Amino acid sequence: MEPVVKFDNITKSYGSHVAVQNLNLAIERGKFVTLLGPSGCGKSTSLRMLGGFETPTSGRIMLGGKDVTRVPPNKRNVNIVFQDYALFPHMSVAKNIAFGLELKGHDRQHIHRRVSELLELVQLQDYSARLPSELSGGQRQRVALMRALAPDPEVLLLDEPLSALDAKLRQQMQIELKSIQEKTGKTFIFVTHDQEEALTMSDTIVVMNKGRIEQMGDPDTLYGKPGSVFVANFIGETNLLRSTMVGTEGDVVTLDWNGITIKADQGGLAPKVGGHLYVVLRPEAIHCSAAEPTSGNRIKGKIRQRVFKGNHTSLMIEVGGGATLNALVHPSDVGQLNGEDVWVGWKPETATVIPDRHAHN
Amino acid sequence: MRYMFADAPRATLTACYWAFLLYLLLPLTLMMAMSFKDANFIAFPIGEWTLDWYVKVMQDKQFLEACLYSIMIAAAATVSATVLGTWIAMLIVAEGIRGRVVIFALACLPAVVPGMISAISLRIFVSAIDMPTGTAAIILGHTVHAVPFVVVMALTRLRTMPGNLVDAARDLGADSVVAFFRVTLPYLGPALFGGMIFCVLLSIDDFVRTFFLGGYRPTLPMLIFAKVQGGMSPEINAMATLVLVVTAAVGLYAEFMTRRARTR
Ligand SMILES: Nc1ncnc2c1ncn2[C@@H]1O[C@H](COP(=O)(O)OP(=O)(O)OP(=O)(O)O)[C@@H](O)[C@H]1O
Ligand SMILES: [Mg+2]
């Protein structure tokens, strides 16, 4: 199927500063796609270029198969939900939502029907006559969303729309957003620097770093098989074990980590013996026990710190040579770990390896 | 003792305030009081009270005509000053404009140039372009004088406007004209309303520019001036009292309205 949005080698610079560099990205229709990355990596710039508020320095943007690189925002079939909502303060909720419909030249009856339909979708029927200043943050958020959806855009763009909400409401809105996306079947492009938010909602996550795409994939892949140290660090908590290659047995590689021999999944890489690699080991993949595990990787260590986090306990374990590992332990397993001594174990296939870009291997 | 002196600065302030109020209100009160006096001379004691002077004023064709004329000029000057002032303010906040400081300084100049100088230069300008003195010239003069106030009020409001309101409007399909009329202008509304009332009052009150630019038809201040030169009479007091009451009411109403809009 033809992608609904295509960034074709897009570069955007402000003077000598390059905000987005050679961006190539194709987005499938009906998907919830998240641009994720640290502050200043060019997420908003990319979104604004798609909205028509910035012109790329070079490259092409395709929307629904048409080149829209130089089309002004009012002639593009995309709508934005702004971070601070940008609701028109002098218009009622209903008027705000009707704004885009009126400009499209729909008749009154149609507008009225569509507005009530959308208000119903977010349970704001009783608020249609209120001014934005008379709404709560979450309600404003919903109105902004409905205003952007009203003209039936091909793609909906959302620039950190949840960042102004408190944690509880944010979680609730994440679920609501996702369900609205599923109900309407629209393509959503969502910008955030919150990895948890990205993992919760997205079909596809595009991890950006310094104006480039670092990795793109579904949440499972990005979490389970990060392609770079940056992605591994940015998404979720992780133990990164810098190791040296010792040998290969089928799909499993044998590595040396600080003098400890460990095994890991080869992960499509074909490293040379003596080369350097990182092993990505998620804290929840580690199994801690008082007795030595019978199979898989196992290291004896000492518990240096315990942090109780409600539904689990986070342990910092020293495993010799000054190296430490973070592990998550289920409450039912904490009971058997009384003293300092502990066995750390994990199955080779739950850890993945990524190349060390800075080393010559 | 110590407590008495501790209160001294406050007491002084209060005293100053009352002295100021007295100084401000006494002449006005005298003027109003005399307008009700049943005699031809402006002096105490008042003796008999009457409303005759008001009846006379209301039947004075000259006065009514001058009122109408002043209102017409004020309306025309206000409309043109508002359009021009808003335009200039939009230009100053627009993206990619060079020399916005210069534009702002030039726009504000007419507010700080002494009335006399402004009047003379306008007169010279008007005759230089062969424009006859009279209605059009007065409107021009009043407009120039009022523009800075509109610019400042519009700018203050524009600076508090979230930048992405216009972006949102454009995103939803508005071109820049529609975005201006449907989003920016309503947002400016309260500020412009205040600015317009101010323009009206400035124009009605203006004497110097009108005097230099005017033709034979007198505006309200010119009529009162002419009448005063013909000798004081309580009729003038009645006229002045009427003008005072109406302008004060308009000013207070405007203040009330803008305040209400701002708290929303
Ligand atoms: N108008 C501009 N002029 C100059 N530099 C800009 C402009 N807009 C953005 N930049 C720069 O481009 C880079 C990318 O900015 P962008 O707003 O896209 O970041 P972002 O990923 O959205 O970050 P955040 O998460 O903080 O919103 C930043 O380094 C920023 O300083
Ligand atoms: Mg941003």
Image: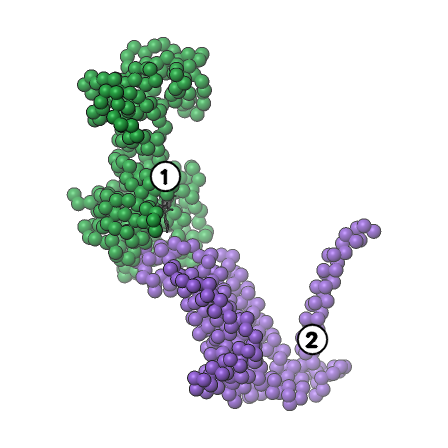
Chain colours: A green, B purple
The picture quadrant where one finds residue A318 is top left
Provide the secondary structure element on which disc 1 rests. Answer: loop
Q: Residue A185, image x and y in percent?
A: 25, 44
Q: Is residue A299 above or below residue A220?
A: above
Q: Is there any visible trace of residue B182 in the rendered image? A: no
Q: Is residue B70 left or right of residue A145?
A: right
Q: Residue at x 46, y 51 (%)?
A: A134
Residue at horizontal 36 percent and vertical 9 percent from the top? A291
Could you tell me which quadrant the N terminus of chain A lies in? top left
Residue A1, numbered circle: none
User: How far apart are the two marked residues, 1 and 2, measured between alpha carbons?
Assistant: 69 Å
- The vertical placement of B55 against A255, above or below, is below
Q: Amino acid at mark 1?
A: Pro
Q: Is residue A15 left or right of residue A349?
A: right
Same chain, labels 1 and 2: no
What number of labels is visible?
2
Looking at the rendering, which quadrant does residue A325 occupy?
A: top left
- Occupied quadrant, residue B236: bottom right
Give the amino acid at mark 2. Pro
| Residue denoted by label 1 | A38
The reply to whether the residue tagged 1 has its Cβ within 8 angstroms of ligand 1 is yes
Query: In the image, what residue occupies the spot 38% across and 64% down?
Result: B181
Q: What is the x, y in percent for residue A9?
A: 23, 46
- Residue sitting at 37 percent across and 12 percent down? A300
Furthest-left residue in view? A1
Q: Is residue B136 visible?
A: yes
Name the one closer to the observer, A4 or A124.
A4
Dot 2 corresponds to which residue?
A: B27
